[in-house]
């Protein structure tokens, strides 16, 4: 299975840190956020990685190169200024991802999800499977609810938050033309309506590194672990 790391976001909430450094290259625990992912993906047996980028993307390519440092092969999917949002970025990168299901990981989260287990996830064509976490303090309303392994719309019950980690079939993005600017949520909502979106709850360590304060806290925790 191939993996895609989403690294095209501008990181407005991380400014001024992201004015001169792309968000995935911000350092926590002595290494860039995206390097934590690369190390874990390599350890889990992944070998081919696709990374999209837009804001200061040349820095990402310069820092990571072809991936040989981690025993990986990295291909890049450049996007125009402003980027293409999640669904648009993935759809544009599909020629690099191939015909089989692939793992997607947000470049601005830190987690110890077992990527290797997800590599063996049995996914039917046109479907997606998301990793969910308990709602963090900055997102108490959550995104969806879980009914067994099925993701459903939250209707006042217990909610969970999308962790930015999921397995997707290429056909999940078949209606999105390359170069289109499109968020992921409409596709997820359509899959929920069709009853075809599945998910699981992850109880390990997960941080949405969305602000300088959360980055500083994560950095301290990793350095003292």
Image: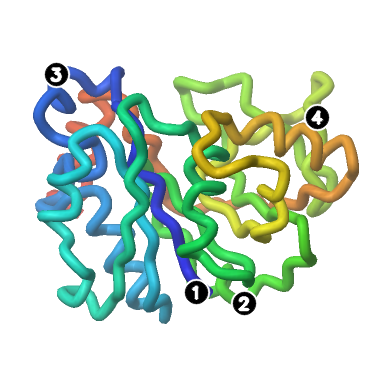
Circle nearer the viewer, 3 or 1: 3
In the picture of the structure, the residue carrying the numbered disc 3 is 16
Distance of label 2 from label 1 (alpha carbons): 7 Å
Q: What label sits on residue 153 in the rendered view? A: 4
User: Of helix, strand and loop, which one carries label 1?
Assistant: helix
First in sequence: mark 4 or mark 3?
A: 3
| Spot occupied by residue 116 in the image (x, y as percentages of width and height) | 50, 74
Question: Looking at the picture, does residue 62 appear above or below residue 20?
Answer: below
- Residue depicted at 29% across the width and 37% down the height: 54
User: Does 70 sit left or right of 130 as displayed?
Assistant: left
In the picture of the structure, the residue carrying the numbered disc 2 is 120
Distance of label 3 from label 2 (alpha carbons): 40 Å
* Label 4: few (<14), some (14–19) or many (≥20) C-alpha neighbours in 10 Å: some
Question: Looking at the picture, does residue 42 appear above or below residue 95?
Answer: below
User: Does 10 sit left or right of 134 as displayed?
Assistant: left
| Spot occupied by residue 185 in the image (x, y as percentages of width and height) | 65, 31
**Quadrant location of the C terminus?**
bottom left
First in sequence: mark 3 or mark 2?
A: 3
In the picture of the structure, the residue carrying the numbered disc 1 is 116
User: Of helix, strand and loop, which one carries label 4?
Assistant: loop
| Spot occupied by residue 139 in the image (x, y as percentages of width and height) | 52, 22
Distance of label 4 from label 1 (alpha carbons): 28 Å
Question: Looking at the picture, does residue 188 appear above or below residue 39?
Answer: above
Q: What label sits on residue 19 in the rendered view? A: none
Residue closer to the observer: 59 or 215: 59
Q: Residue furthest right?
A: 194
User: Of helix, strand and loop, which one carries label 2?
Assistant: loop
Check contact, mark 2 vs mark 1: CB within 8 A.
yes
């Amino acid at each position: 299975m191939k993996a895609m790391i989403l690294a095209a976001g501008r990181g407005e909430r991380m400014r001024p840190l992201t004015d001169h450094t792309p968000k995935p290259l911000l350092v926590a625990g002595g290494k860039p956020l995206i390097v934590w992912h690369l190390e874990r993906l390599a350890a889990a047996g992944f070998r081919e990685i696709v990374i999209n980028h837009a804001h200061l993307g040349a820095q990402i390519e310069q820092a990571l190169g072809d991936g040989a440092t981690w025993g990986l092969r990295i291909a890049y999917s450049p996007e125009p200024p402003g980027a293409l949002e999640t669904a648009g970025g993935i759809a544009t990168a599909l020629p690099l991802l191939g015909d089989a299901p692939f793992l997607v990981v947000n470049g601005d989260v830190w987690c110890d999800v077992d990527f290797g287990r997800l590599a063996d996830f049995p996914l039917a064509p046109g479907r997606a499977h998301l990793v969910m976490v308990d709602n963090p303090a900055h997102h108490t309303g959550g995104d969806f609810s879980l009914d067994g392994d099925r993701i459903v719309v939250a209707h006042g019950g217990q909610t969970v938050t999308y962790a930015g980690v999921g397995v997707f079939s290429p056909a999940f993005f078949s209606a999105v033309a390359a170069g289109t600017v499109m968020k992921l949520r409409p596709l997820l909502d359509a899959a929920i309506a069709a009853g075809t979106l599945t998910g699981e709850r992850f109880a390990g360590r997960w941080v949405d590194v969305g602000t300088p304060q959360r980055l500083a806290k994560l950095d301290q925790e990793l350095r003292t672990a």
